[in-house]
Image (tube, rainbow, N blue to C red):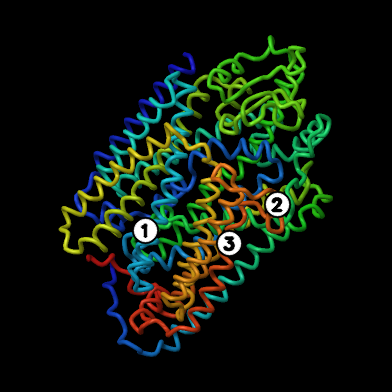
Amino acid sequence: MSVQVWTYILVAVTFGLYIGIAFATRVKDTRSFYIAGQGIPPLWNGMAIAADWMSAASFLSMTGLIAFMGYDGAVYLMGWTGGYVLLALLLAPFLRRFGKFTVPDFVGDRYGSDALRALAALTAILISFVYVAGQMRGVGVVFSRFLQVDISTGVIIGVFMVFLYASMSGMKGITWTQVTQYVVLILAFLIPSIAISLQQTGNPLPQLGFLNVVGDLDTLQRELGFTAYTAQTRSTLDIFCITMALMVGTAGLPHVITRFYTTPTVRDARTSAIYAICFIALLYTTAPALAVFAKTNLIGSLNDRPYAEAPAWFKTWEATKLLSFTDKNGDGVIQYRPGNALNADKTPNADSANELTIDNDIMVLATPEVANLSPFIIALVAAGGLAAALSTASGLLITVSGAVAHDIYYKLINPNASEAARLLAGRITVGFASIAAGYFGINPPGFVAQVVALAFGLAAASFFPLLVLGIFDKRMNWQGAMAGLLVGLGFTLVYIVNFTPTLGGRGTPDALFLGISTQGIGTLGMLLNVTVALIVSRLTPPPPAATQDLVEGVRYPSGAGAAQIH
Amino acid sequence: MTNPPASPPPVSAPVSEQKQAYWRATIRLILTLLAVWFVVAYLMGIVFAPALNSVRIGEAPLGFWIAHNGAIYVFIALIAIYATRMRALDRQYGVEE
């Protein structure tokens, strides 16, 4: 059977499963809708956290990014797992003990400030939207390549799927679909990786196999004029700051924190963190190995090969415009060299001998074909990419829904809303958020990459200090938190916009502060936030006794019962 | 949900000796684990990675390997130690759920 037939079968089966699970777990109250009734056992919550955490970016883009960045790809590998350590140690158990519905809930109650609650809700919405748009693009890419529909149709199918199951079953159903999606995505990632590792190194474990071939890749890259794969290319300070900003930024991502609200006890929250990091590490330790295999394969099968003899998969990917060949020297042979083959306006770049343009997003999807794996495995990878995108998108939609329907509508606008009205508001928000996400998936803003840097920077400079100080510094008051937030957010925002031409910035790279790129500046934003917050809070009156008792309360697990029914 | 929510302590009630000791132990544990986190990820994985690259693990340079694989194994250990130690502290200081 062909790849396309297998893809249809696997997509139909998995989508059917997701909808079936949602129908079986449909909910009728807000406690189930937002925090799954706090009845999720740690093992399953660990899997759901892993699926929530690993987005289309982790599954589809990260391996490609690492393959092209070499050592520097460590910023993602360590950034997105090391941030999880911060989340597990500093935030998850304490926020679970607090036991409400959303992250802005904690901010609002801890600082006794509606302005901060609103600001937190808006930040949660902004961050989640940037993410969701990326997930929808991932769905579009998979559909357009494997089912030959156009990207828009793919996005609409994805949006409809997520809307259907998120609005029907809320957090409760999402938990179980995420568990299923984790199984699909990890199998889809590991099976081809193991097959390729065996093929290239004779060792079935990619984590061990790649140790023996990465030296050859270093040699190969040097021969073509690239820097060695395992050498740092960015400045050490910049790598340091980007890694820190990604860690601190991801630790404050509201959609992942919320997943810890769903366990029965604080102890279970800590236990689910262990399961989750193990499930995440399965993919994150395999990805750098796959990156090495993919890069080696790619260079081997394309470089210095006549275009007319290019493998069949080259043509299929060319059709999606995610892979292209520009024969600059007119010899009909593909040359892969350092630099960009094309300028930003798609004209040939005369400064580089490179003739090959490869989109990061296709590395994982193309590699099984490049390695001649069976059609079934290639189709499985497509289903895995969809699972990764949908699982994260659904978690994000519930977060947006919580911020709008719970924090803004119920807590700030209409505190008398009935349970039924609040549930309906939650469902309607999921609907609108899905439509907006679909719009941005079909018409991605030209500056998606920069906006993602913005989202991490903003999360690093806002949520993380706000939450950590709220738990560990009893003396922190709303004045300090607000001042720190405004300074940290303001600084980060201005810096990123100033150095991003697509956002109208005029800053030139040599004017960067200590050479720190926009991706890493959230680290300084966070430090500014903390410093200002500590100083201002000491110059203003301490928070009221009730607030100090609340902080005391989240520090000790005993008495972590059900979320209070508001 | 075996335990009913504890009623909040009366306003301005001093925190018991026991709970203060528990919190100090918690902070000590977190700081120790984060020190390891920092040394492995930022010092061994980034700042001193080029120097460590002269040592090889298989064919791979050590600094590169820590940044791409090794640090993640350490992260798993840190979270596992945290959860088990915290469970013991909960019991020792009588603040279990």
Estimate the x, y position of residue A548 in percent, counting from the top left: 39, 81
Residue A160: x and y, percent? 31, 33
Chain letter of the residue carrying label 3: B
The nearer-to-camera label among 1 and 3 is: 1
Q: How many other residues sit within 10 Å of disc 2, few (<14), some (14-19) or many (≥20)?
A: many
Give the quarter of the figure containing the N terminus of chain B.
bottom left
Q: Which residue is mark 1?
A: A121
**Residue A193 location (% of width, % of height):** 60, 33
Q: CA distance from mark 1 to mark 3?
A: 31 Å
- Between circles 3 and 2, the one closer to the viewer is 2
User: Against B14, is A76 above or below?
Assistant: above
Counting every numbered tag in the picture gives: 3
Q: Is residue A28 above or below residue A298?
A: below
Q: Does mark 3 fall on the same chain as mark 1?
A: no
Residue placed under numbered mark 3 in the picture: B78
Left or right of residue A419: residue A133: right
Residue A342 left/right relative to A439: right
Residues at marks 3 and 2 on the same chain: yes
**Observer-nearest of B19 and A152:** A152
Residues at marks 1 and 2, CA–CA distance in whole angstroms: 37 Å
The quarter of the picture where the C terminus of chain B appears is bottom left
Query: Callout 3 environment at 10 Å: few (<14), some (14 to 19), or many (20+)?
Result: many
Name the residue nearer the viewer: A494 or A140: A494
Amino acid bearing label 1: Ala
